[in-house]
Amino acid sequence: MKLIFAIVSSDDSSNVITELVKNRYSATKLATTGGFLRAGNVTIIIGTDDDKVERAIEIISEQSKSRMQFVPAFPELDMESMGDQEVKVGGATIFVVNVEEFYKV
Ligand code: 2BA
């Protein structure tokens, strides 16, 4: 069994969850905050069988479209020297880890 952590933009999270549930995945949505942009994003955790991981990743990537966004320098982060930045937003950052034990009691 695997645990998938998918960090997606708040805008895409509803579509990602809808498609996962339609495809019979169990998922939990956590409201999270990106360390760089300090903006809200969503982390979706999915526990699933090894042979279902690939399809879950396909669904997540189909529903998470990346785009470029221009963001001003962040004075509060002491990053003035970096100047304004163009960063990729959206898309998904996905981690897949092995589950040693799983209980529903
Ligand atoms: P944030 O940390 O808010 O980062 C948003 C976007 O800003 C990143 O998109 C990337 O394009 C850019 N960025 C992040 N750190 C940067 C830096 N030090 N210098 C220049 N640009 C930087 P993504 O890479 O698609 O990441 C989207 C969100 O996924 C991140 O939001 C963070 O919440 C999470 N994430 C990404 N990589 C991670 C990792 N290795 N570990 C934990 N969380 C991660």
Image: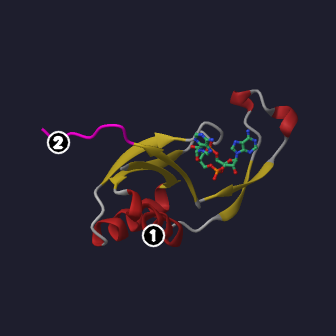
The one nearer the camera, 58 or 100, is 100
Label 1 environment density (alpha carbons within 10 Å; few <14, some 14–19, many ≥20): some
- According to the image, label 2 marks what residue? 104
User: Mark 1: which secondary structure?
Assistant: helix
* Rendered image: mark on residue 59: 1
On screen, residue 58 above or below 100 = below
Give the x, y percent position of residue 5. Answer: 46, 48
Give the x, y percent position of residue 91. Answer: 59, 61
The one nearer the camera, 52 or 37, is 52
User: Mark 2: which secondary structure?
Assistant: loop
Q: Which residue is drawn at 65% across and 39% down?
A: 36
Taking 90 as reference, is 22 left or right? left
Q: Which of marks 2 and 1 is nearer the N terminus?
A: 1
Give yes or no for residue 7 being in the magenta stretch: no
For residue 103, what is the image quadrant? top left
Taking 62 as reference, is 76 left or right? right
Label 2 environment density (alpha carbons within 10 Å; few <14, some 14–19, many ≥20): few
Taking 10 as reference, is 105 left or right? left
The dominant secondary structure in magenta is loop
* Rendered image: mark on residue 28: none
Nearer the camera: disc 2 or disc 1: 2
Q: Which residue is drawn at 36% across and 70% down?
A: 19
Q: Which residue is drawn at 37% across and 42% down?
A: 99
The one nearer the camera, 90 or 83, is 90
Identified by mark 2, the residue type is Lys
Q: Which residue is drawn at 30% across and 37% down?
A: 101
Pick the quarter of the image with the C terminus.
Answer: top left
Give the x, y percent position of residue 28. Answer: 32, 50
Magenta stretch bounds? 99-105
For residue 16, what is the image quadrant? bottom left
Identified by mark 1, the residue type is Ile
